[in-house]
Image: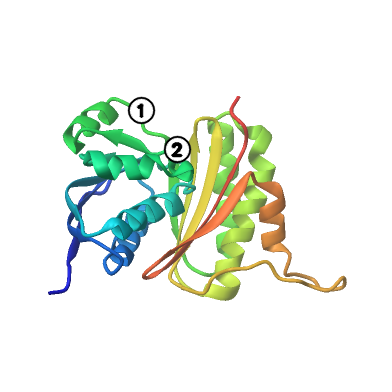
C-alpha cells in the first residue's frame, strides 16, 4: 500500500502553521517540500511545522525532512520552527550543520503563545499588473517606506533592486505580481511573486547591449538573493542592509 502524507495549512498570517500527518519517506518527501514552499511564499512572520503526528517510514525519510528544511532556511525573514518533533526526528535534523538556524517548540500552541507577543515586522505589499508603470509604483513605494522606517540610507539601492525585479516580470513573466517590501532586524527584504514557472538567470549581454544586466545588479547590490519555486509560479527575493 503506498504511503500517504497530508500537509494541511491551519493558519496563514501573521504566523503560519502547517500540520503534517502521515508517513514521510522518499516518495512523499516531495509533497512536503512543495507544501513548505507554498507556505513560505505567502511570507508569514514565522512558519510552524507541526510534526507531532508525522511518522518516518524509513531512515531516508528523515533525510528528506532535513533536506526540505535546509533548502528553505535561506528564505529571508521567515524563521522555521519544528513543533512536536520526536527525539529521533530532532536528533537527525540537529545533526545537519545547514539546519543550525531551525527553531524547536514542544507544540504549536506553546509557540503561538510566545510569538503572539512579538511585534510584527514592518511590511508593505502591492499587487501589480505587468505594465511598465509598475516600476514607477514600486520605486515610489520603496522610497516612502524607507523614509518612514528611517532607512533612507538604503532607499536608492532598494528602489533600484525593486525596479529590476518588477521589470523582469514585466518583460518575461507577463503575469500579475505581488510585491512585498519589509524591514526586520534592521535589514530590508524585497520579493516579487509572479505566475510564471520560468526561472530567472543572469544574462550575458554584449558590451553594446542596452539591457540584460538586471540580475547582475541584484546580485552585486544585495547581501543575498534567490528564487523560491512554487507550484503556480515563483518568488524572487533579495535582502540588503546591515542592522543599525
Residue 100 is marked as: 2
Q: Mark 1 points at which residue?
A: 119
Count of numbered badges drawn on the protein: 2
Rendered residue at 30%/40% (across/down): 90
Residue 51 appears in the rendering: yes
- Residue 136, quarter of the rendered image: bottom right
| Callout 2 secondary element | loop
Q: Which of marks 2 and 1 is nearer the N terminus?
A: 2
68 up-or-down from 124: above or below? below
Rendered residue at 34%/60% (across/down): 33
Which corner quadrant holds the C terminus?
Answer: top right
30 up-or-down from 219: above or below? below
154 vs 220, nearest the viewer: 220
- Residue 170, quarter of the rendered image: bottom right
4 vs 114, nearest the viewer: 4
As measured in the structure, the alpha-carbon distance from the residue carrying label 2 to the one carrying label 1 is 24 Å
Rendered residue at 87%/70% (across/down): 207
Residue furthest out toward the left: 1
x and y percent of residue 166 in the render?
57, 61
* Left-right relation of 35 to 196: left
Residue furthest out toward the front: 59
x and y percent of residue 156 in the render?
69, 43
116 up-or-down from 39: above or below? above
- Dot 1: few (<14), some (14–19), or many (≥20) neighbours within 10 Å? few
- Dot 2: few (<14), some (14–19), or many (≥20) neighbours within 10 Å? few
x and y percent of residue 230 in the render?
39, 65
Residue 197 is marked as: none
137 vs 184, nearest the viewer: 184
Colouring: rainbow
- Residue 14, quarter of the rendered image: top left
Amino acid at each position: 500500500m503506498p504511503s500517504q502524507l497530508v500537509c494541511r495549512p491551519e493558519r496563514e498570517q501573521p504566523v503560519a502553521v502547517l500540520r503534517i500527518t502521515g508517513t514521510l519517506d522518499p516518495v512523499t518527501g516531495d509533497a512536503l517540500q512543495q507544501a513548505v514552499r507554498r507556505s513560505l511564499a505567502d511570507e508569514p512572520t514565522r512558519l510552524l511545522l507541526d510534526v507531532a503526528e508525522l511518522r518516518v517510514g524509513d531512515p531516508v525519510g528523515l533525510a528528506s525532512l532535513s533536506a526540505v528544511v535546509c533548502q528553505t532556511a535561506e528564505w529571508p525573514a521567515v524563521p522555521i520552527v519544528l513543533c512536536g518533533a520526536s527525539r529521533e526526528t530532532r536528533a537527525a535534523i540537529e545533526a545537519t550543520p545547514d539546519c543550525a538556524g531551525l527553531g524547536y517548540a514542544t507544540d504549536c500552541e506553546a509557540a503561538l503563545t510566545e510569538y503572539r507577543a512579538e511585534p510584527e515586522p514592518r511590511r508593505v505589499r502591492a499587487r501589480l499588473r505587468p505594465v511598465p508603470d509598475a516600476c514607477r509604483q514600486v520605486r515610489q513605494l520603496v522610497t516612502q517606506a524607507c523614509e518612514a522606517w528611517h532607512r533612507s540610507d538604503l532607499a536608492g539601492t532598494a528602489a533600484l533592486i525593486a525596479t529590476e525585479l518588477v521589470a523582469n516580470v514585466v518583460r518575461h513573466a507577463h503575469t500579475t505580481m505581488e510585491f512585498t517590501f519589509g524591514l526586520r532586524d534592521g535589514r530590508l527584504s524585497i520579493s516579487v511573486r509572479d505566475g510564471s514557472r520560468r526561472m530567472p538567470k543572469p544574462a550575458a549581454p554584449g558590451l553594446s547591449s542596452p539591457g540584460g544586466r538586471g540580475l547582475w545588479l541584484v546580485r552585486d547590490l544585495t547581501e543575498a538573493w534567490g528564487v523560491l519555486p512554487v507550484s503556480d509560479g515563483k518568488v524572487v527575493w533579495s535582502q540588503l542592509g546591515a542592522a543599525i
